[in-house]
Amino acid sequence: MRAAARRGEWHGSTGGQCSAYQQANLVILPKEAAVEFAAFCTRNPKPCPLIEITPAGDPEPARSAPGADLRTDLPGYRVYRGVSSSNSGAKSATSGATISSPSCSVAA
């Protein structure tokens, strides 16, 4: 699945496509928000289990998906910038720590 996304051959949802693997979502946050989000996940392990935190700028989730590249191995994503409860919608990317969590954040 990652290889197909990397080659640009897969553009749809990955849900249900790799039943032997854990399905996850990806959250990329500015460094200053990453610690608070990780604490939230730690306090809410059932709905938001934390799979991995990568160092800022590192695109490889080395523990959960060695060799993967978060920049190319996801078929699609939504990016939000400056979003609050009263401001939502697709915006442009921000850099920071990468947090992978099945319910709150990469299909590995």
Image (cartoon, grey):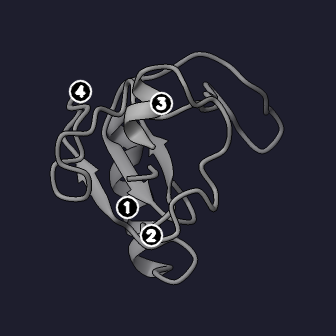
Image quarter for residue 69? top left
Inter-mark Cα distance, 1 to 2: 5 Å
Q: How many marks?
A: 4
Of the pair 93 and 72, the residue shown nearer to us: 72
Secondary structure type for disc 2: helix
In this rendering, which labeled residue sits more in front, label 4 or label 2?
Answer: 4
Disc with the residue nearer the chain's start (3 vs 4): 3
The 10 Å Cα crowd at callout 1, few under 14, some 14 to 19, many 20 or more, is some
Q: Is residue 44 left or right of residue 21?
A: right
Helix, strand or loop at disc 1? helix
Q: Are marks 1 and 2 in contact (CB under 8 Å)?
A: yes
Q: Which residue is mark 4?
A: 57
Residue at the spot of label 1? 38
**Picture residue at 63% right of the left edge, 62% below the top:** 16
The residue beneath circle 2 is: 41
Q: Nearer the viewer, mark 1 or mark 4?
A: 4
| Amino acid at the residue labelled 3 | Ala
Q: CA distance from mark 3 to mark 4?
A: 21 Å
**Image coordinates for residue 20, horizontal then vertical, percent:** 44, 71
Position of residue 19 measured from the top left corner of the image (x, y, whole percent): 52, 69
The disc placed on residue 5 is 3
Cα separation, mark 1 vs mark 4, equals 17 Å
Three-letter amino acid code at disc 2?
Answer: Cys
Side of 46 where 54 appears, left or right: left
For marks 4 and 2 on the same chain, the one whose residue lies earlier in the sequence: 2
Up the image or down, 48 lies above or below 53; here it is below
Q: Which amino acid is tagged 1?
A: Ala
Asked whether the residues under the numbered discs 3 and 4 touch, taking CB atoms below 8 Å apart as contact, a structural biologist would say no
Distance between mark 3 and mark 2 Cα atoms: 27 Å
